[in-house]
Image: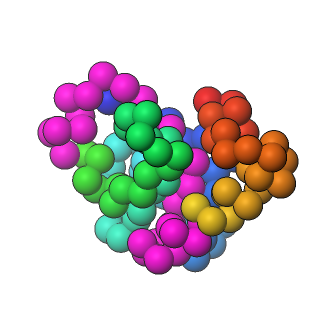
């Protein structure tokens, strides 16, 4: 499993300095208390998924041979839901359709 943070990652409730530290910890696969990440779906059953970041560090996900592309981060599940709404608003405004992979160049 690889975790890749998109260069245009969306965030909520996180200051700029703290954001840089979080991105570094995510890139190094270090545990972070209370961090939620928004990724593209694991399977083709949706548009985006919200995970507690520490959940992705568990053996079940580590065994997966795939890359998790992080497109949003937040400090709570409610904030993560708002980030998802913000991403969808921007995607529809830009493309006119819910194509997350095209919008983030994944």
Which quadrant of the structure image shows residue 105? Answer: top right
Query: Which percent across, then down, holds residue 65?
Result: 30, 22
Decide which of 47, 74 is in the foreground and name it: 47
The answer to whether 10 is drawn above or below residue 98 in the figure is below
Question: Image point 57% across, 48% down: which residue?
Answer: 71
Tell me the magenta residue range: 58-83
Which quadrant of the structure image shows residue 89? Answer: bottom right
Question: Image point 19% across, 46% down: which residue?
Answer: 58
| Coloring basis for residues | rainbow
Query: Which percent across, then down, holds residue 12?
Result: 60, 71
Query: Which percent across, then down, holds residue 81?
Result: 51, 69
Residue 88 forms part of the magenta stretch: no
The answer to whether 50 is drawn above or below residue 64 in the figure is below
Quadrant that contains the N terminus: top left
Decide which of 24, 102 is in the foreground and name it: 102
Residue 62 forms part of the magenta stretch: yes
Left or right of 15 on screen, residue 103: right
Left or right of 91 on screen, residue 41: left
Q: Is residue 16 visible?
A: yes
- For this orientation, the residue located farthest to the right is 94
């Amino acid at each position: 499993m690889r975790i890749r943070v998109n260069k245009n990652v969306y965030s909520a409730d996180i200051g700029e300095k703290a954001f840089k530290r979080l991105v570094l910890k995510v890139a190094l696969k270090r545990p972070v208390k209370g961090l939620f990440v928004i990724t593209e779906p694991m399977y083709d059953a949706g548009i985006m998924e919200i995970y507690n970041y520490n959940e992705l560090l568990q053996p079940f996900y580590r065994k997966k041979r795939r890359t998790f592309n992080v497109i949003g981060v937040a400090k709570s599940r409610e904030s993560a839901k708002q980030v998802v709404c913000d991403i969808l608003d921007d995607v529809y405004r830009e493309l006119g359709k819910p194509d997350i992979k095209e919008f983030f160049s994944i």
